[in-house]
Image (tube, helix red, strand yellow):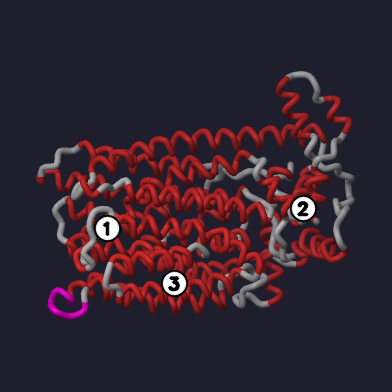
Amino acid sequence: MASQNGFMHAQKMLSTSSSASKGSPDSERDEQDGARLPVVAAGEPSFDGLSETEKAAIDDIVLHAREEYTEQQYKRVLRKQDFLLLPLMWLCYGTQQADKTSVATQATFGLRTDLNMTGQQYPWLTTIFYLSYLVAEPFSNYLMQRFSINQTLGTMMILWGVVVGAIAASQNWATVMALRALQGALESSISPAFLIITASYWKTEEHSLRALIWGTSNSGMGIITALGMYGIARRAQDHEGGLAPWRAISLFLGPLTVTLGILAFLFLGTPRESLLLRTEEKRIAQARVVASRTGTDRLKRKWDWEQFRETFRDPVVYIFFFLVLINALPNGGTTSFGNLIFVSFGFDPLETILKGIIPQNVLGIAWFLTVGILTRKFRRIRFIMMMASLVPSFVGTLCISLLPKTPDYRWPKYGCYLITVTGTVTGLMIWSIAISNVAGRTKKSVVSTSLFIAYCVGNSIGAQLFRAEWAPNYLPAIGISSGFYALEFIMMFCFRLYYVRINRRRAKVIEQRGMCEEEVKREGEILAERDTPDHLNPYFVYDI
């Protein structure tokens, strides 16, 4: 197994540096890192233990492909990815967000009353979605690795579009619950698929901006669908006795999702799978991302049980898990009750769309793009921007929970809730950090699965924090959300320090080995193409 050989290879020692590094506790730690450095023979790439097919593929993509193409060719393929692939990703991701959160708008237009929901029945529509998402997530990852991303994602999108449309025919809470459970299982494919696609087409320094661009679709498609839903609701109000607005919303979103699912089946996938690029362009796209040292899709990777076990020895997996869990807790409540919170300020359902949802989404897009541009222009500020994004969310939720309930504070509360949208950037950027800092195909699958488990658990619990007895203001739940934002800020600060420490220790050990920059670069890329996980590739540099 290629990665197993990589583990054995990465655990050899260079005796000269080992003897020189003994002594202090810091030196002992450096020796432990040094023990994981593979032996480097200048001019001889580390091809031991590989099949002839693997050697040829790695030799082609690492040692030859990049040399064959000009900067103009790389830029041409990058432009094609940015102008053809990104817009499709934007539409698909935004539509799944609209499908997922559509119950929030439907709730303001009669969903709860028409189906006679009582107590905690409404928040259970969100909880069951994420519980189903949680159960289905490992199977989705397996299917994408067993078959292909485009086939798995496209098929699931078509099916969940049918489910969303079927909600329009529901006559009771139990039916909607069953459909939401099925929808959650099917939607579990898109986010992990997009993480792999982003890592396959763009380099590490490009991940943040691209992920934030398709991440703006949550707000961008939110505006588009909100305007569509506003028109539907307005027409329903003007023609009483016709189709209920919440049913028409499902009939609007369902066919849209099916159409995009067909396009996803054809064009979304890794460079090796997609019809977007020609054969030569696929090789150029793969050659571009070699320098990221996270591995390309040049070889189809099989599930690696050795890498699976090794993944759980990396503490970063657990840090990611709890960070996503804490991030998802307030998100689970606000995605289900955000519209109802605006209504509690004194707005009617139509005003909530025009004065609440759309302005908040516009602010969200502006902040997403600002963070994306800054992180692309300045290196090593991704964690700083994530922490900065949490501050308005913390301040906004805390102020709402403390302000008096009187109508005089309607607009201050409105402003406070509006700025909480900046915190949504943080959730997506955690995923972009995972894209850049996790190598090894099986490890990527394990990490993405664990992150989505945390995401689902957090959102499920978060929806239940908004208790029926706290309606219509839900002030205790909003106050609890502010506490989660503060805790998330502290965890991110500590996480960044951890990555900085690992990078410095690796740089120190490499310096002791006396390796030149070209040797470090070559060995790091070869180990990555051998599907070596990041924590066992001592030449891997974590992006912060």
- Residue 375 image point, x, y percent: 51, 48
Label 1: which secondary element? helix
Label 2: which secondary element? helix
Instruction: Examine the image and state in which quarter residue 37 appears.
Output: top right
On the picture, is 443 further left or further right than 425? right
Q: Can residue 353 be seen in this view?
A: no
Q: Give the range drawn in magenta.
A: 235-243
- Give the residue type that dot 1 points to: Pro
Label 2 crowd bin: few (<14), some (14–19), many (20+), radius 10 Å = many
Instruction: Examine the image and state in which quarter residue 271 appears.
Output: bottom right
Whether residue 21 is situated above or below residue 246 in the rendered picture: above
Label 3 crowd bin: few (<14), some (14–19), many (20+), radius 10 Å = many
| Marks 3 and 2 close (CB-CB < 8 Å) | no
Rounded to the nearest angstrom, the CA distance separating label 1 from label 3 is: 29 Å
Residue 349 numbered mark, or none: none
Residue 3 numbered mark, or none: 2
Query: Mark 3 sits on what residue?
Result: 160
- Give the residue type that dot 2 points to: Ser
Does the segment drawn in magenta span residue 239? yes
Q: Nearer the viewer, residue 215 or 338?
A: 338
Mark in front: 3 vs 2: 3
Does the segment drawn in magenta span residue 364? no
Mark in front: 1 vs 3: 3
Query: Mark 1 sits on what residue?
Result: 359
- Residue 504 image point, x, y percent: 67, 33
The residue under the point 58% across, 63% down is 197
Whether residue 227 is situated above or below residue 498 in the rendered picture: below
Label 1 crowd bin: few (<14), some (14–19), many (20+), radius 10 Å = some
